[in-house]
Amino acid sequence: MPPAVAPSPPSSADLIGFHTFDYARHFLSCCSRMLGLEHKTNRGSIIIEYYGRDVGIKIMPTGAWAARPAGPRRPACRLLPGL
């Protein structure tokens, strides 16, 4: 089996964002198991030290905008007459 290769995001990013805490937790678990990295928390932030650099992990939930535009919806395509 080939040796584990470090994923590119931790090697080039200073901050990695996830939509949910579960996604971040799975990523941290993967970093721990595959790369031997441990995370630390400091006043609510999660940090992984990677080759002497601190890489921040942030949970950034984004929601769908519930407001709908006013007026009738237009079809995505026009139907040809007679079809």
Image (tube, helix red, strand yellow):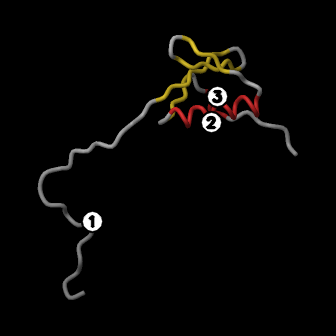
Q: Position of residue 66 (x, y in %)?
A: 26, 45
When the figure is inspected, residue 14 is found, relative to residue 6, above or below; the finding is above
Q: Which tag, 3 or 1, sits closer to the chain's start?
A: 3
Badge 2 vs badge 1, beta-carbon distance below 8 Å: no
Image quadrant in which you'd find residue 28: top right
Q: Which tag, 2 or 3, sits closer to the chain's start?
A: 3
Residue depth check, mark 2 versus mark 1: number of the one nearer the observer: 2
Image quadrant in which you'd find residue 10: top right
The residue at the point 51 percent across, 30 percent down is 17
Q: Quadrant of the C terminus?
A: bottom left
When the figure is inspected, residue 43 is found, relative to residue 50, above or below; the finding is above
Q: Position of residue 50 (x, y in %)?
A: 69, 20
Crowding near pointer 1: few (<14 within 10 Å), some, many (20+)? Answer: few
Tag 2 secondary structure: helix
Question: As shown in the figure, which amino acid type bears the numbered disc 1?
Answer: Ala
Crowding near pointer 3: few (<14 within 10 Å), some, many (20+)? Answer: many
The residue at the point 73 percent across, 33 percent down is 6
When the figure is inspected, residue 83 is found, relative to residue 55, above or below; the finding is below
Q: Is residue 76 left or right of residue 81?
A: right
Q: Which mark is residue 26?
A: 2
Crowding near pointer 2: few (<14 within 10 Å), some, many (20+)? Answer: few
The residue at the point 73 percent across, 24 percent down is 37
Image quadrant in which you'd find residue 62: top left
Q: Is residue 55 left or right of residue 60?
A: right
Question: As shown in the figure, which amino acid type bears the numbered disc 3?
Answer: Pro
Q: Which mark is residue 52?
A: none
Q: Quadrant of the N terminus?
A: top right
Tag 3 secondary structure: helix
Q: Which mark is residue 10?
A: 3
Residue depth check, mark 2 versus mark 3: number of the one nearer the observer: 2
